[in-house]
């Protein structure tokens, strides 16, 4: 039962736990980057590891990654053009060849125009997304937290987390 409720507890904890707006905003911005990059390559795995290893809000990051995974498909024509423009720079071809001959680099799929373009677009959007979302989280998180804590479902989810902790000790 606890495993079925875990995603909902995770979401409730992400919204109602005491997190600084800065952590929420950086988590969301990193989630946007993760969401834009196509999955199934070492770049996406590395970005997920960065999300998990840094002190940002995982809930905000995972929510943004989920949303922008769908948005990312809509940006494929744009990211293809960006990636293709970078990959077709003639002076960089020897550099690309040397990178591709390294042991792990082929698993990054950097030679795929959509992967490279999505990564570059996500990196370009990282700081602007942070700067736009931080004031929003600062303004709306306390209100949302108060409203959510009134719902019995959120109290139940917090209670199942507490009971899960007692059961694991």
Image (cartoon, rainbow, N blue to C red):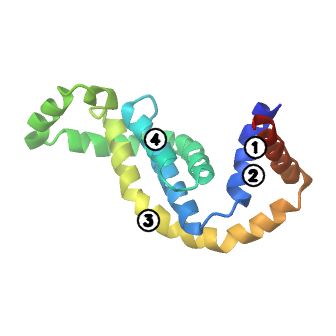
If the image is split into quadrants, where does the C terminus sit? top right
Q: CA distance from mark 1 to mark 3?
A: 29 Å
Location of mark 4 (residue)? 49
Mark closer to the chain start, 3 or 4: 4
Q: Nearer the viewer, mark 1 or mark 3?
A: 1
| Mark 3–mark 4 CB contact (< 8 Å) | no
| Residue 98 seen anywhere in this rendered image of the structure | yes
Q: CA distance from mark 4 to mark 1?
A: 22 Å
Closer to the camera in the image, 136 or 81: 136
The residue shown at (39%, 30%) is: 41
| Mark 1–mark 3 CB contact (< 8 Å) | no
Q: Which mark is residue 128?
A: 3
> How many numbered tags mark residues here?
4
Location of mark 2 (residue)? 12
Instruction: Classify residue 130 as left or right of residue 152.
Output: left
| Mark 1–mark 2 CB contact (< 8 Å) | yes
The residue shown at (44%, 28%) is: 40
Q: CA distance from mark 3 to mark 2?
A: 26 Å
Instruction: Classify residue 116 as left or right of residue 168.
Output: left
Q: Residues within 10 Å of mark 3 (few under 14, many from 20)?
A: few
Q: CA distance from mark 4 to mark 2?
A: 22 Å
Q: CA distance from mark 1 to mark 2?
A: 6 Å
| Mark 4–mark 1 CB contact (< 8 Å) | no
């Amino acid at each position: 039962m606890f495993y079925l409720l875990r995603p909902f507890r995770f979401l409730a904890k992400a919204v109602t736990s005491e997190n600084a707006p800065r952590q929420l905003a950086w988590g969301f911005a990193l989630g946007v980057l993760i969401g834009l990059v196509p999955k199934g390559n070492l770049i996406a795995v590395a970005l997920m590891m960065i999300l998990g290893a840094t002190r940002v809000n995982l809930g905000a990051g995972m929510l943004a990654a989920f949303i922008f995974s769908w948005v990312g498909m809509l940006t494929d024509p744009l990211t293809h053009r960006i990636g293709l423009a970078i990959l077709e720079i003639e002076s960089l071809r020897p550099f690309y060849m040397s990178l591709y001959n390294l042991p792990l680099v082929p698993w990054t799929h950097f030679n795929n125009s959509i992967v490279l373009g999505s990564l570059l677009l996500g990196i370009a959007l990282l700081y602007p997304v942070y700067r736009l979302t931080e004031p929003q989280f600062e303004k709306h998180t306390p209100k949302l937290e108060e409203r959510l804590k009134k719902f019995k479902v959120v109290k139940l989810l917090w209670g199942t987390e507490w009971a899960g902790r007692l059961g694991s000790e």
